[in-house]
Image (cartoon, coloured by chain):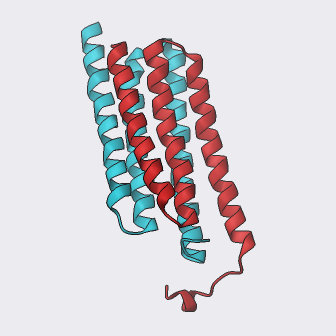
Chain colours: A red, B cyan
Amino acid sequence: MASFLFGAAGFVLTMVALGLFVILQRPAEVDHMMAAQLLGTGGVAILLLLAAATETPPIVDVALLLALFAAFAAVAFVRNASSSEPEIPETASGG
Amino acid sequence: MKLAFDTFTVFFVSAGAFFFLAGTVGLLRFPDSLTRLHALTKVDNLGVGLVVLGLLPQAHGLFGALKLVSIWLLVQLSGAIVTQLIAGAVRQHGPHG
């Protein structure tokens, strides 16, 4: 069972790393924020799999903190974006 | 009984890993920021949900299982709210804001 869970954690880690690599190549800032979200969601899954594989329950707490920090990071990003620039009127942006 | 639990775990963790694969493929293939946001948050949250469901039989007692479920709830709630916030920021300022 443990080896299957390790394998699954490695697979999810590979997928997250591939996604991060691709996202960070893109120029838009919102893509960088998505990279942080991807690391948050994928990291939770990886840590939960590792906690079950190694039978180390404290790793679950690390996953909980990672989920919390990903949420805080996104809220900080959106607050920064909405306060730094003047609002573009709806008619100019074309809906 | 243990065999049944292990089969359950293998099935649902594999399904969750498949959804992470689907999310990454979506990130690679979709053309703009909003559709990529869609792939990232919805599909990966489904992956986390399936992984948590698969790990429930391996949890240490009722308390451990409840903790896994509450982490899943936190990820779902924050994922849904964060998606709306980021999409709203993209709509207001464009993808470079």
Look at 54% across and 67% down and name the residue there: A28
Look at 49% across and 19% down and name the residue there: A51
Instruction: Give the answer, above or below, for where A94 lies relative to B22.
Output: below
Classify the position of the N terminus of chain B by image quarter: top left
Residue B28 sits in quarter: bottom left
Mark yes or no: residue A55 visible.
yes
Q: Which x, y percent locates residue B17?
A: 33, 36
Instruction: Give the answer, above or below, for where B27 lies relative to A39.
Output: below
Instruction: Give the answer, above or below, for where B59 lies relative to B48.
Output: above
Name the side, left or right, on which B19 lies relative to A82: left
Mark yes or no: residue B49 visible.
no
Instruction: Give the answer, above or below, for where A34 lies relative to A70.
Output: below
Look at 52% across and 18% down and name the residue there: B64
Classify the position of the C terminus of chain B by image quarter: bottom right
Number of numbered tags placed on the structure image: 0
Q: Which residue is farthest bottom?
A: A91
In the foreground, A19 or A69: A19
Q: Which x, y percent locates residue B42?
A: 41, 51
Q: Which residue is farthest top?
A: B1
Q: Which residue is farthest right?
A: A83
Name the side, left or right, on which B57 lies relative to A74: left
Q: Which x, y percent locates residue B37?
A: 45, 59
Look at 63% across and 40% down and name the residue there: A68
Name the side, left or right, on which A91 lies relative to B54: right
